[in-house]
Amino acid sequence: MNNPRPCYLQIAIDTPLNAVFDYRWQCEDHDRPAVGQLALVSFARREVVGLIVGVADETDVPVDKLKDALAVRSQLSPLSQKWLALAGFAADYYQRPLGEVALPGLPKNLRVLTTVALDRALKKLAKLDAPHDATPADMPVLNPRQQAAADVIGGAQGFTPALLYGVTGSGKTEVYLQACAQVLAREPDGQILILVPEINLTPQLEGNIRARFPGVMLATLHSSLSEGERMLHWLAAHQGKARIVLGTRLAILSSLPHLKLIVIDEEHDPSYKQQEGLRYSARDLAVWRAWQLQIPIVLGSATPSLETWHHAQSGRYRKLELRERAVKNAVLPQVKLVDMERDKPKDGLTSQLVAAIRQRMERGEQSLLFLNRRGYAPVICCESCGWISECTRCTSFMVLHRPEHRLRCHHCSLEMRIPRHCPTCGNVDLQPLGRGTQRVEEGLQALFPEARVLRIDADSTRKKGSAQQAFDTVHRGEVDILVGTQMVAKGHDFKKLTLVGIMNPDTALFSQDYRASERLFAQLMQVAGRAGRAGIPSEVLIQTRYPQHPLYGAVVHHDYDHFASALLEEREQAALPPYLFQALLRAEARELATAIEFLSMARDCLAQPGITINDPIPMTMTRVHNVDRAQLLVESPSRPALQAFLKEWMQVLRAMKSRVKWSLEVDPLDI
Ligand code: ADP
Ligand code: ZN
Ligand code: ZN
């Protein structure tokens, strides 16, 4: 009976080497490991967990080179073929080894825990109660447009990509929830994946889901969970117990055996793009996953990305529109431009903006001032010799943080006390130049001593839970004037907020980055969308030196359609994405010349028709933390042609074995 014999496991391991490794495993025929299971092996003198991608009777590896696998994690059901195909697609598309894609996507504890510890975890999961059957919170009656959208999404069969294009406050969330309700009712085991840009900024959504579906297990997956929680939630999804998974971009690689619907909220948000390591777009992978499983996917936004808009215009995605705000009497705010050449700002505030804030104070309503720059001032300078506070390690300035009496570089960790005198000439009168949120907060407090001013930015919300606390204070009406960065621009439903002041958005108008205007427009529409949501008349004041600029005209008229169509036309004429496909090769070295030299070699080592390789150039912010960075842009009007080129190119580059650190990004957002 007992008759173990060897089989050979092909195991993907998280290494930059583009390979799968063979290991020997003794077992009986009936308990052969399965593809999709995890195995513990020794690799480069360490014990690591790898993913079994093949099981064979033979191997080409010579017997003396072959090692035994140490253990197979048989207590965990295998990852499905579909999941493996998803990881395989991502690996191919982003030109990375499978192991580097598949394994980091799994909870760390699955990889590092001993077998005994893993069993204990698993036991905890078995004990995890299904939620109780409390009464679900009432569903508001949808308006006809919302109902039509929810029915399309909830009733769709097969691959149905839809853009839910709805102005801020139009009740997109309600559409998602009722579409979810339809799917959950129809599919007894069905699972739903809801992706949001940043979970900390959408606490209302999690509460809404729990209240609406009290009998359904909800798992959340995002980076602020502890490793223990993350594994528990991941397993709940993997075992099919959790029927709704709410997460940030990393949740796109979670294992969901019965996935029936994907929702992507604020699909235009740049946070869906991972900016280091495997630089994937969770939104794009989600669309692929929906296609693979032949299920519906809804992408929601008031300001869709041009990529998504392009698909909706061409009919590839279904366009579902919500043109009005959902709450009775709530209308979009009135947007006005304040010409800073005529109404000269004092302490950054024009007299019109000050008057508007005063009015809100008198009426007991809230104001929000938006400025996408934290700190007190972006730089300090010496007026007598011209010295400015540059970072010694980066191509950037040291930002003044006055409450903390520090200068800080926002790109490396460098920090120092504010110098008492100019390091070059000794002048003691160093001046802050420009303004950040701290300085605006200080100015407002001086102007309105009786006002309750609250600043919300990355500095004021460092402690865990403090962002939530700050937002709660606003919701309770304990704040008169809110000052904040993009953290306050997204998603929030502040009922008493009736004025949004935008301090100085002009710099983005003249950026070299061709995506800057798309981004600025989205940001202005989002932050403007915080005002007047409960039906009180509201306004948005944009302080600018360029009131004639067409971008501002489009914001004034809340006219995304025309603006987007004009931008798309420009992009088509200039041959830019989404009419062109790009990849960016980056290199970094102590000396810029070394990085450029490597990229020049890369440029010359392979040529293919239909592929344009540009010249290497230093990155805009060339030096960060004493490392110089350069980039090389590759372009093609054909995605398959670009993919084919990249595959071959990567092999050539890997074979070069250069000591320069390099990486490739497919579909880069920042060029
Ligand atoms: P969006 O995500 O489109 O910005 P939300 O989903 O946050 O909008 O909805 C805005 C507000 O409208 C919320 O307070 C929500 O409760 C409310 N709302 C949504 N749909 C309806 C409806 N059909 N009837 C009444 N209120 C609604
Ligand atoms: Zn000086
Ligand atoms: Zn620095």
Image (tube, helix red, strand yellow):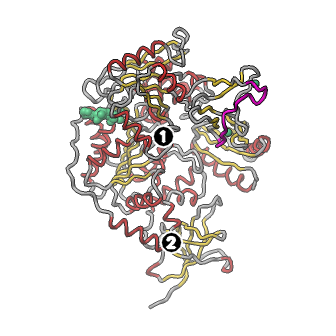
| Residue 114 - label | 2
Asked whether 390 or 415 is in front, the reply is: 415
- Residue bounds of the magenta highlight: 412-427
Determine whether, in the image, residue 641 is placed left or right of residue 194: right
Quickly name the residue at label 1: 461
- Residue at 50% of width from left, 41% of height from top? 271
- Where residue 238 appears, x then y in whole percent? 40, 61
Q: Quadrant of residue 167?
A: top left
Crowding around mark 1 (Cα neighbors within 10 Å: few <14, some 14 to 19, many 20+) is some
- Where residue 651 appears, x then y in whole percent? 68, 54
Q: Which of the two marks, 2 or 1, is nearer to us in this view?
A: 1
- Residue at 45% of width from left, 64% of height from top? 79
- Residue at 43% of width from left, 63% of height from top? 80
Q: Is residue 416 magenta?
A: yes
Question: For ligand 1, which image quadrant applies?
Answer: top left
| Residue 330 - label | none
For residue 171, say whether it is visible.
Answer: no
Asked whether 374 or 314 is in front, the reply is: 374
